[in-house]
Amino acid sequence: MSERATLSVTDVVRRAPFVIETELDGEIILLHPETGECYALDAISTRIWTALAEPGSVRSICSALIERYDVDRATCEAQVLALLEQLRGEGVIQRSEAPGI
């Protein structure tokens, strides 16, 4: 699968296998061992990271968030895609080879 410039809601994403994580006060701290960079995830970003314990489509992640929070699909998808693009840019998530869910 080629790397497109941006993710879409049909893409399946997964955690990069080398990322180290720990929980602190209900939120996740990520460490990229190759760069030494740390990333602190807020509560909602932590939910998204937790959902990525198994590869999943952006759409399925958004569906779970919409059930829990008062947010419309368009807003949720835009914000989740922005976060996932940022995490992908930092190398802590990857587009999966699995077909869209």
Image (cartoon, rainbow, N blue to C red):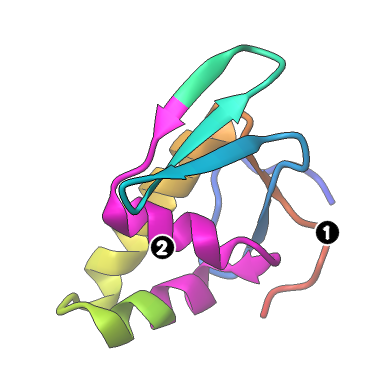
Q: Quadrant of the C terminus?
A: bottom right
- Amino acid bearing label 2: Arg
Q: Nearer the viewer, mark 2 or mark 1?
A: 2
Residue visible at 29% across and 46% down in the picture:
42
Residue visible at 52% across and 78% down in the picture:
60
**Any mark on residue 87, and which?**
none
Outermost front residue: 25
Number of residue marks: 2
Dot 2 or dot 1: first in sequence order is 2
In three-dimensional space, the C-alpha distance between marks 2 and 1, rounded to whole angstroms, equals: 23 Å
- Numbered disc 2: secondary structure: helix
- 8 w.r.t. 18: above or below: below
Is 53 left or right of 42, judged from the image as shown? Answer: right
Outermost top residue: 35
The magenta region covers: 39-63
Is 75 left or right of 94, judged from the image as shown? Answer: left
- Amino acid bearing label 1: Glu
Question: On the image, which quarter does residue 11 sit in?
Answer: bottom right
Question: On the image, which quarter does residue 100 sit in?
Answer: bottom right
Is 15 left or right of 28, judged from the image as shown? Answer: right
Q: Is residue 82 magenta?
A: no
Is 72 left or right of 36, judged from the image as shown? Answer: left
- Numbered disc 1: secondary structure: loop
Magenta stretch, main secondary structure class: helix
**Any mark on residue 47, and which?**
2
Q: To which residue does mark 1 refer?
A: 97
**How many residues crowd around disc 1 within 10 Å: few (fewer than 14), some, or many (20 or more)?**
few
**How many residues crowd around disc 2 within 10 Å: few (fewer than 14), some, or many (20 or more)?**
some
Name the residue nearer the viewer: 3 or 42.
42
Image position, residue 80 (x, y; %): 38, 57
- 68 w.r.t. 62: above or below: below
